[in-house]
Each structure stands twice: as structure tokens, then as C-alpha cells.
Amino acid sequence: MTALMRWAAVLFSTVVVTAGCTGSTGETTRSATPTSSTSPAPAGEPVATPLLARPVAAPIPVPGTDGRTHLAYELLLTNVLSQDVTVSTVTVQGGGASLLSLSGDALAHWTRILGAAAKPTTTIGPAQTAAVWIDATVAPGNIPTRLDHTITVALSQPAPPLLPPIMTETVAPVTVQTRKPVQIAPPLRGPKWLDANGCCEMTPHRMALNPLDGQLWAAERFAIDYVQLDPGYRLLNGPAGKLTSYPYFGTDIHAVADGPVVAVLDGLPEQVPGQTPTGLPLDQYAGNHVVQDLGNGNYALYAHLKTGSVKVQPGQRLTSGQVLGSLGNTGNSDAPHLHFHVMDSPDPLRSDGLPFVFTSFRLDAQTASIDVFDTLIAGKPAPLRPGSHARDESEVTPLVSDVMDYSGE
């Protein structure tokens, strides 16, 4: 995890993600067989399943800048045995095809025990719950209506015939939502805005699962942290610990669509860049912020705004492009940036993150790695992905590492 922009991940992914993680799973465990076969058991014939499985939320398809449609969601696996189990494969099927198969190091990369976000693993201890972050992709227009999951596990203390050494479960069927991503304008203007922390890789945003009111919420599933690079793809113009070294500090933030303001917070102080804030209450994690109702159950969050810059009030109806505040470094932020996401309720944390697409923008470049911030904060230019080239995009969502030009807005 990089040092930048962990406003919910720090609190929830590494310390206290334990509550609300099991729940009822009877509705998601449909068939399994205690062999290495993937054939489901005959209808009505129950079988043992050492792992209970359920998604945090059903996926909503969203097209990305890579030309693929993404089904991004989280699969929770709970070990109900008094022994370790090791997951060897997780396969996602849909539309009669295998959409994603994870095993070995690749599976460990996408899997964490709740409360242990820093440690990739495929072993789940007794009574532990792990999350597997899923990013299944399909060609545009080839979206399945339902997804199934086949999970193969090895038991550390097998007890055949009920619990053989290797077991394969076909579990957690989930219906793909027919909901469409909201179409919006970008919240910024100008060139070289980097998506430094977004979907669909294992970024701090994707890994943030918030345990609130006895339930897990993935509010930041599609969130973007925006920083602006200079013409040489550098971030800084001076010492990293000074706000004035970030030329884009104070940049105008624009409403992404028409719609009323439902919540505002202003007056929180700017944080010192390079220092991770501590001791924040929940309502200050987003710093100074605005929440806007975009309609049809979509709410936009504009977070970490500059102190005293918010220009709007609750109840005020905004028009697309209207300036609502300035980019800052407030709340749980250790470098100036705009945190933007869309969610299904007005609460920045107690909500489910929803996908969105921008009407149009120009994709300028892509960084060579998602772990680029340490390079940038050292004053060096971001290495770019070989072969990436500028092109116009429309009705897609940016992906982590995309560098975007919003000059045409």
C-alpha cells in the first residue's frame, strides 16, 4: 500500500474489520461435492462445505478504458471448521464460460483475512473470514445474467468420507445487476489528472471494507483519488511536506451532473503532507466534503476539499460544471488530492460503491505500475506504460494508472 490516500482503508482494512462479516449464507450455498470434481450434487442432496461464501454486493457491469466490461465485487469466505483450510483455486463462471480463475500467488494477491489487510494469503484459519476481491471481465455486450463460484480447498485435518483432503464447492450464485452506471462529467478540468488509487486492482480503495452497524460496506469500490502531473509527468514543485509544492492544490472542483446538495462539511484544517492523520472521528474521514444527489439512487462524494472553499449549501441545486469548492488536503489525507466516488446513499462510509462512466475525456497515458506514488513523492517522473497512446474515450470508467486530460470539458 502506498502512502497516499487511505482515508477509509487505514481505519477499516488494517485494524477493525471484524464485525458483520459472517451473517446468513444459506441463500448463497447451493451445491458442492466432497471430491475434486466440479459437478454439483444432485438436487436436494446436501453436502458438507467447509467454507461458507457470499458476495458483499451483487456486481454492476461497467465498461473500462481497457475495452473490457468489469464485474468488480468482493466474495467473503468463512471457515466453519476448527482447522486451517487452504484455498487452491477460485473460479468465476458465467454465461457458460469461465470468466476468471485464480490460483497460487495470483489468488493470494487478491485475498486477505479480514483485519489483516497487509498480508496476502490463501490459508483461512478456524472461524476466520477472508475476502477475495473479484474483477471478472467480459467483452462488451457479453454480460452474463448470473455468476457462480467454484472453490477448491485443502483441509489440514481431513476426516473422510465427510471431509476428504481435497474438496470442491460450487457456491454463492449471484445475479448480475441490470442497473446501469450513472453517466457524468469529470469533476476536474485541465490536463494530466492521474487516477492514483482506483478500480479495479488491489488498491486501498478497493480493499476498504467498512464494518458499520453490523454490516460490511464497500463504499470505495470504484473511488478515484486524483492528483495532477506536470508536462513531465512529475507531481511536485518543491519539498513534499509543503502544500505549496503541489501546483494543483486549490484547483476548482466541478459538479459532475445536475442535482441537489444533500450534505456539506467545511472548516476542518489542512493536514501536513507526508503525515498520516490519526484520531479522526468517522464524520471527519472525508475531510471537508460535499455530497450531491445525482438521481436514481446515485450520490456523488467530493472529499478532502480545501478549508473554507466550499461554495454550496444543503438543498442547493447544482448544475453540471458548477464550481462547488477547491481541491485540498483535509480529513484522512496525506497529500493534496480529490477523492471522488459514487454511492447508493448519502453516507460516505455506510454505503455501497456504485460504478460510473464519464461522458467523454481524453486518455493521455497510463503509468507503468499502480505503485507509482512513492516515485512521484520523491520528485521523479512517473514511468509510463510502454505502448500506451493518447486517445479519446466516451462512456467508460477510468482505471487505476490512467492519466486523463479534461481540457475539453
Image (cartoon, rainbow, N blue to C red):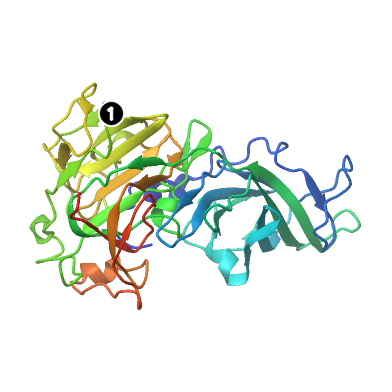
Q: Amino acid at mark 1?
A: Gly
**Residue 264 visible:** yes
Looking at the rendering, in which quadrant would you find the N terminus? Answer: bottom left
Q: Position of residue 259 (x, y in %)?
A: 28, 28
The residue lying furthest to the right in this view is 161
Q: How many badges with numbers are in the image?
A: 1
Residue 95 against residue 177 in the figure, above or below: below
Q: Position of residue 280 (x, y in %)?
A: 29, 41
Residue nearest the viewer, comparing 104 with 323: 323
**Residue 116 visible:** no
Residue nearest the viewer, comparing 338 with 192: 192
Residue 336 against residue 237 in the figure, above or below: above
Residue 71 against residue 274 in the figure, above or below: above
Answer with left or right where residue 34 lies relative to residue 321.
Answer: right
Residue drawn at (28%, 69%) of the image? 374
Would you identify the image quadrant in which residue 379 lies?
bottom left
Residue nearest the viewer, comparing 377 with 345: 345
Q: Secondary structure at mark 1?
A: strand
Q: Which residue is mark 1?
A: 259
Q: Position of residue 9 (x, y in %)?
A: 39, 50
Residue 146 against residue 344 in the figure, above or below: below
Residue drawn at (31%, 34%) of the image? 283
Would you identify the image quadrant in which residue 25 lies?
top right
Q: Residues within 10 Å of mark 1 (few under 14, many from 20)?
A: some
Answer with left or right where residue 61 lies relative to residue 284.
Answer: right
Q: Position of residue 169 (x, y in %)?
A: 76, 54
The residue lying furthest to the top in this view is 315
